[in-house]
Image: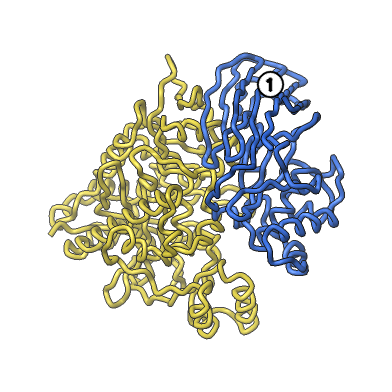
Chain colours: A blue, B yellow
Amino acid sequence: MSRTLEFSYDIALDFDRPVTAHSFVLRCLPADFPGQRVLSAALTLDPAVPYTEQRDGFGNRLQIGRIDAPHRQFHYRAAGQVLRDDGARQPEPDRRIFRYPSPCTAPSAALRDAAAALELPADARAKAWALLEAVGRHMQYTPGVTGVDTTAARAFAMGQGVCQDYAHVYLALARLCGLSARYVNGLPEGEGASHAWCEVWLDGIWTGIDPTQARWADEGYIRFGVGRDFTDCPMERGVFLGGANQCQTVFMKVSEQ
Amino acid sequence: MEDLIRHAEQINRQLARNGVKFGIYKNGTFQERLFPFDAIPRVITAGEWDVLSKGLVQRVRALNLFLKDVYGEKRILADGVVPEEFVYRSPGYLAPCEGILPPGGVYSHISGIDLVKGKDGTWYVLEDNLRIPSGASYPLIARQLCRRCSPDTFRHHAVMDNRGYGDLLRRTMDSVNTGGINVVFTPGRYNAAYFEHAFLAEQTGAVLAESGDLYVRDDVLYYKGTHEDCRVGAIYRRVSDEYMDPLTFEPSSLIGIPNLMAAYRAGNVAVLNAFGNGAADDKGIYYFVPKMVRYYLGEEAILHNAPTYLPFYEKDRKYVLDHLDTLVIKDVAEAGGYGVMFGSKLSREELDKMRDTILAQPRRFIAQEVIDFEDLPIMEGTEKVERKADLRAFVLSGAKDTVAWPSGLTRFSRNPDSFIVNSSQGGGFKDTWVLSH
C-alpha cells in the first residue's frame, strides 16, 4: 500500500556563548531511494546562510555550509512530502561493502561468541528476524548511557542503549551471520526524535528492519541516510570556534497526508 | 669520490645549518634528530635505471588504476583478482571516498616505492607508499651541498641531475590544479618532516600553509592572503587522511580544514595525494600488485615483489606456519618499521605465540622470505664498513603522465645486524646517483 507522508524535522542548536567559523554538514533531507520518492523537500536555516548540496558515495544528500559571524544559535528545519511504496520494488544490487565490519560495528569476542551460539534458520528472511529477536533479548532500551560514538561492541557489553546502539549491534551480528546489512537513519511515523534502524538485503530488496521497535521498517519510515554505520551518515556534523557548550533540541513529526 | 668523503663532515654541518632534521616522539616527548648523511653515494647505472624506471612507472600506473577502480566500478573485486575483503577490511580504505573521481583521475601523485637490491643484482619492491611518502628533499639538498663542496666530482662522473625535482613536482601540481594557487599544507613545525614541507614549498613556488590559513566556503578552498583571500586549485598536503577534515574523518582533529572533503568532492580542488590511498598500499594489498599490472595493463610486472605469502590463503598459511623461523612476518596495519618480526630472532615460545596469532587472524599478516640484500659501503669514522641499505624511489603522476625521478633516498642501517633502515629507527641516508650513460 503506497502512502504519502508529510514530515517536518526541527533542530535547534543553542550555545551558551557566541561561536564563529561554524562549518557544518547536514544530511537532513530525504533522497529518492527504491520505494521512496521525494515529492517536495525544503530546508530553512537560521542564521540564513547559503548552503550547497552534494551527494555522498552512498547516495545520501548533503547540505554543506558555514556561518562566520558570531552566533548563539543555529536552528534549521526540513519539511516536505514523501511517497513510500514498497509494493512494486525491483531487485536491487547487493553492495558487498555492507557485508564487512565498519568503525562502529567491528565485532568483539563477545559478539563473535554470541553470533556463533545462535541457532539460526537457513532462510534469509527468517534469519534476519531471528537476529532481531536476539538483539531484543540481549538489549535493554536505556537513554543516556551511550553516546554517538559508542560502538556495537561497547553497547553489547553493556546490554543497553538507544536506537543507534540497537542498530549497530544488529548490524554487527547480521554481518557475522553472513547477511548484507546497512545502517539507516530517518524519521518514522509519529512525533519526537529522529530514529535509526537497519536494512537487510533479502531476495534482492533492501528491506527495512527496526531492532529497537522489533518490527519490519515498513512504509511508515522515511529514509534520510544510509551507510555502514552511524559514522557514514550522521544527520548533523559541525565544528566551530569558541569554547561554548551546546544544547541540542530535536523535534520531528511524520503523519499521513 | 675520495674528495666527497673528505667533505662529509662539512656537508653534515651544512645539513644541520639548513635544518635538515626529522623529529621523533620518544617516551612521549618530541625530539629533533639530525639525519646522518654518508657521502658515498649509491650508484645506479644507466642500464639498470632504464629497467627500474620503466618498472616503477608501470607499477604506479597500475596502482592508480586500482584506486580508481576500488572507489568506482570495482571490476577487479567483481572479477575476484583481489579478494574484496582485502579492500573492505583495510584500515586504509575510506568509505567517504566512494564514487569520487579526483581531478585528472589521479590518486597517487607522489609515490614512494621502497626497493632493495638482492645480492644477485635483482631489484625487489618491498613496499609502496601512496599516502604521504616523505624523503625526496634529503637527496635533493644533499646533492646541492655535494656539488658545492666538490664540484670536480660531478665533472668527472656522468651523474643525472636530480635538482629538477621541484619543477617536476610543480608540473604535477599544475597538471591537476583546478584553478587557483598551489599550496603545501603542513601540520606545523612539530612534524617529523617539517623541514621537507618548507623546502618543497620553496622548490615548487607553492605557498606553505597551516590549518589556520585555509578555509572552505561554497565548496571552494581559500587561502587567507594578506590583501585578499585566494582560491586554491591544488593542495599538496602532508597531513594524514584522518586529520584532514573534522567533518568527514576524525572529529577531534584541530589541524584539519573543515569541509575540505566538500571542496574535493565537488571537483574544486586537487588533493595530493588523494584521500583513501591507503586501500592500495596496505601490506596485504602489496601481494596483489603484480596481478594488478597484468589486470589493468595487460603486461607482466617488470619489478618483482619479494617472495610473499598470504596466510589468508590456506596453501600459503601452511607454508608460513611450517617455515616461521626463517620468514619475516609483517603486521599489515603497522608502518615505519614497526610490526616487523624476523622469525629467526624469535624464541620458541614467541614462535608458538606467533603461530596462534596467525591462525586467529590470518588476514592481519603477510610473510616474506628474507632477501639477502646488498650491503653498501658507509664511512664509520675513517673506516669503510658495509651496511644494509634500501632505496625509496619517487614516482610522480600528473594528469598526463607518470615519471620516475632519476634519484631517490637511499637509507642505511647503522646497526650492522639490522635490516631495518627507517629513519624513525635511527638510520642514515645517502645520495642516489643515476648515471646518464
User: Which chain does the residue under circle 1 lie in?
Assistant: A
- From the top left corner, tell me how far across and down residue A163 is, in percent: 77, 43
Decide: is A78 above or below A232: above
- In the picture, the quarter occupied by the N terminus of chain A is top right
- In the picture, the quarter occupied by the C terminus of chain A is top right
Q: Quadrant of residue B299?
A: bottom left
Q: Is residue B27 left or right of residue B390?
A: right
Decide: is A196 above or below B269: below
Decide: is A202 above or below B263: below
- From the top left corner, tell me how far across and down residue B16 is, in percent: 41, 46
Is B61 in front, or is B395? B61
- Identified at 17% across, 61% down, the residue is B46
Q: Is residue B305 left or right of residue B96?
A: left
- Identified at 50% across, 23% down, the residue is B217
Amino acid type at mark 1: Arg
Mark 1 residue element = strand
Is B103 in front, or is B368? B103
Q: Is residue B418 left or right of residue B380?
A: right
- From the top left corner, tell me how far across and down residue A96 is, in percent: 54, 55
Q: Quadrant of residue A27?
A: top right
- Identified at 48% across, 26% down, the residue is B219
Looking at the image, can residue A152 be seen? yes
Q: Quadrant of residue A58?
A: top right
Q: How many marks?
A: 1
> Dot 1, crowdedness within 10 Å: few (<14), some or many (≥20)?
some
In the rendered image, which residue does mark 1 sit on? A77
- From the top left corner, tell me how far across and down residue B136 is, in percent: 35, 49
Q: Is residue B115 left or right of residue B154?
A: right
Looking at the image, can residue B382 be seen? no
